[in-house]
Image (cartoon, rainbow, N blue to C red):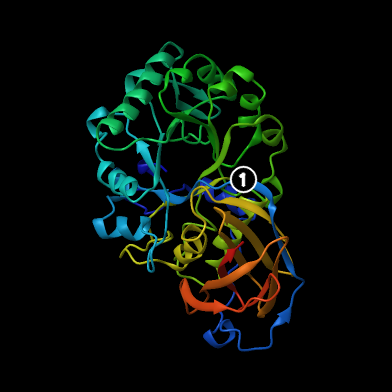
Amino acid sequence: MTQGRNEPVSGERRSPSRRTVLATMGALPVLTATTSPARASGAAAATVAATAVIDPSVRRQTIRGFGGMSHTAWIGDLTPVQRDTAFGTGEGNLGFSVLRIPVPENQANWSRDLATARRAAELGATVFASPWNPPAHMVETFVHGTQTDARRLRYDMYGAYARHLDDFTGFLRNNGVNLYAISVQNEPDYAHDWTWWTPTEMVRFLRENAGSINTRVIAPESFQYRKNISDPILNDAAALANVDIVGAHLYGTPFSDFPYPLFKQKGAGKELWMTEVYHPNSSDSADLWPQALDVAEHIHRALVDAEFQAYVWWYIRRSYGPLREDGRISKRGASMAQFARFVRPGHVRIEATANPASNVYVSAYRGGSSTVSVVAVNKGASAVSQQFTLANGRVSGVSSWLTDASRNVAPQGATGVSNGSFTLTLPARSVTTAVAGVA
């Protein structure tokens, strides 16, 4: 997240102190042995699970998409081929539909990420941006705990900062990219190397200045989905009126903190996005399996438990990211693609039996009037025979794709259907996506 600490010298995004936080929160699990291809194939007898009932009549959140960050200044730009791999939707692509880019402090650098933003937009992706710092002349230093050179936006520069964000939006628009949204500040509560904001300062800026920004506004992007950072916004009607998307990061956030009752109470008409994460860490290769399966469960939890509408990875191309440094899709990337390629912007999450068997996680999404996509994650060491039943509907046909130890989003062909139900064998430690035609 900051060049000084992590790019390019150490090759890591977070400082040791951040890893201490993650480890303390239990976000760095012990790796288990890689599943053998024979076991992953489901050759062993499959455990029979309870039926997963899918009910299209119970609608949850509208999905905006899945994606990642491109930051040319810190790690270099994506190549043209990598852009197409990331944002293309066909076989061998990630299917990303969201791109996050930085807002450089200096206007002379505003074009750095333009080529990738343009291509992503051409391929139908939503582009949004986050700033790490205001321009230097808008900032003052202060004492923050033991930090004697902490930075904050000068109070007399709030209006100028709003114009800075709006000017960046206009620059992109004039260069072929309609920015969907812009954030006030990346991680204002973890700003040792960038600009701090208190909740009071964030509310003040939103109340008095954010309304002049001519695109959607994202706040507060807390590094750990800390509700004490976002609660004041939800509890202030004037500030909330100038926020379109409540954004959060999930570094070390326990699953028990994913639900947000106050947002459900007061966030009507607003969107809820997870705007940055890597999981479970940035130190291991993205090709470790079954560790990469943790990504699929994390996405499931973010969509089902937290009801986020977008899920955005940190760097798109990185040793721990969805694209490896050579531009090929990693195992973590394949876990993401099981969602991203088949759960498209505008799809609506619908009710489904979320945990029909131990270590099995199911979510379902309605795409228009004719399809339902079902993503099933099996983290168990045994295959599971999983029946899916569509409540009050008819299934006309089912195709599926599979990622496990030996396969990446591999087409599995058609599955038989009977009386609105179909059954899939979920191999040990795998993620399966089924797309069903419905009526």
The residue tagged 1 is 61
- The picture places residue 200, in percent across and down from the top left corner, at 59, 20
**Observer able to see residue 307:** no
Q: Amino acid at mark 1?
A: Gln
- The picture places residue 44, in percent across and down from the top left corner, at 65, 88
**Observer able to see residue 65:** yes
Question: Residue at the spot x=47%, y=75% of the render?
Answer: 411
Q: Nearer the viewer, residue 169 or 437?
A: 437
Q: Outermost residue, top direction?
A: 156
133 w.r.t. 40: above or below: above
The picture quadrant where one finds residue 246 is top right
Q: Outermost residue, left direction?
A: 108
332 w.r.t. 195: above or below: below
Answer with left or right where residue 31 lies relative to residue 8. right
Identify the secondary structure beneath mark 1.
strand
Q: Nearer the viewer, residue 243 or 420?
A: 420
Answer with left or right where residue 324 lies relative to residue 367. left
Question: Residue at the spot x=51%, y=14% of the render?
Answer: 208
The picture quadrant where one finds residue 272 is top right
Quarter of the picture holding the C terminus: bottom right
Total numbered labels placed on residues in the image? 1
Answer with left or right where residue 294 lies relative to residue 333. right
The picture quadrant where one finds residue 105 is top left
Quarter of the picture holding the N terminus: top left
